[in-house]
């Protein structure tokens, strides 16, 4: 599933739930962030440790669970079996058989990814990203747009 960064989010009813659960106003615009695919180019670059830490914390508390789950479409077909020892997040996955999910190991904690979304609201914008975004940033050097980085950094 691929959406360009900063396009309007229309994938699910998540915004309606967020308006109710977080009291977001009707004026908030919901934008897509980090819906990467191996078939489309994306911006790469370096992010700060502070940003990465906050993104992982958001992904750990991700919401809006789906029935199924997505795998990373940027990784090669078969990567590696997860190792609890491999801090730095070697992941995953045999996509052909859908047997193993994409995961990230961050500071000793394993996050299983691909079934939830995060929402980062800042001013009149709420960015919605797949929880896989932490994997994209760390393993594929994905560099999200500045507005999203600011929103995450301003998050407590
Ligand atoms: Zn990947």
Image: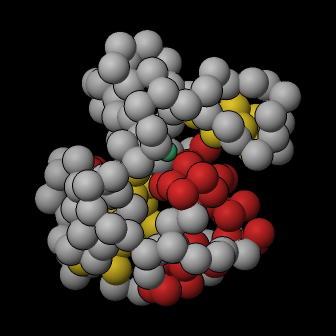
Q: Is residue 26 left or right of residue 68?
A: left
Is residue 135 visible to the viewer in this orientation of the structure? Answer: yes
Q: Position of residue 78 (x, y in %)?
A: 48, 27
At a point 51% along the width and 66% down the height, the residue shown is 142
Q: Name the colour scheme.
A: secondary structure
Is residue 25 visible to the viewer in this orientation of the structure? Answer: no
Report which quarter residue 150 is drawn in: bottom right
At a point 33% along the width and 20% down the height, the residue shown is 96
Whether residue 26 is situated above or below residue 109 in the rendered picture:
below
Picture mark count: 0
Whether residue 66 is situated above or below residue 26 in the rendered picture:
above
Find the residue positioned furthest to the left.
10
Most foreground residue, 125 or 133: 133
Q: Is residue 7 left or right of residue 61?
A: left
Q: Position of residue 102 (x, y in %)?
A: 51, 32
At a point 36% along the width and 43% down the height, the residue shown is 73
Q: Quadrant of the C terminus?
A: bottom right
At a point 68% along the width and 64% down the height, the residue shown is 52
Q: Position of residue 154 (x, y in %)?
A: 62, 80
Report which quarter residue 114 is drawn in: top left
Q: Is residue 110 left or right of residue 26?
A: right
């Amino acid at each position: 599933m691929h959406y360009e960064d900063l396009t309007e989010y229309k994938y699910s009813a998540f915004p309606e739930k967020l308006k109710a659960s977080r009291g977001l106003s009707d004026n908030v615009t919901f934008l897509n962030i980090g819906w990467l695919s191996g078939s489309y180019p994306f911006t790469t670059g370096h992010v700060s440790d502070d940003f990465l830490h906050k993104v992982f914390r958001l992904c750990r508390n991700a919401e809006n669970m789906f029935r199924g789950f997505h795998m990373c479409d940027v990784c090669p077909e078969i990567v590696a079996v997860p190792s609890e020892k491999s801090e730095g997040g070697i992941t995953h996955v045999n996509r052909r058989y859908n047997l193993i999910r994409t995961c990230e190991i961050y500071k000793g904690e394993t996050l299983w990814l691909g079934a939830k979304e995060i929402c980062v609201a800042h001013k009149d914008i709420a960015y919605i990203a797949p929880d896989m975004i932490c994997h994209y940033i760390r393993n594929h050097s994905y560099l999200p747009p500045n507005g999203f980085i600011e929103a995450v950094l301003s998050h407590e």
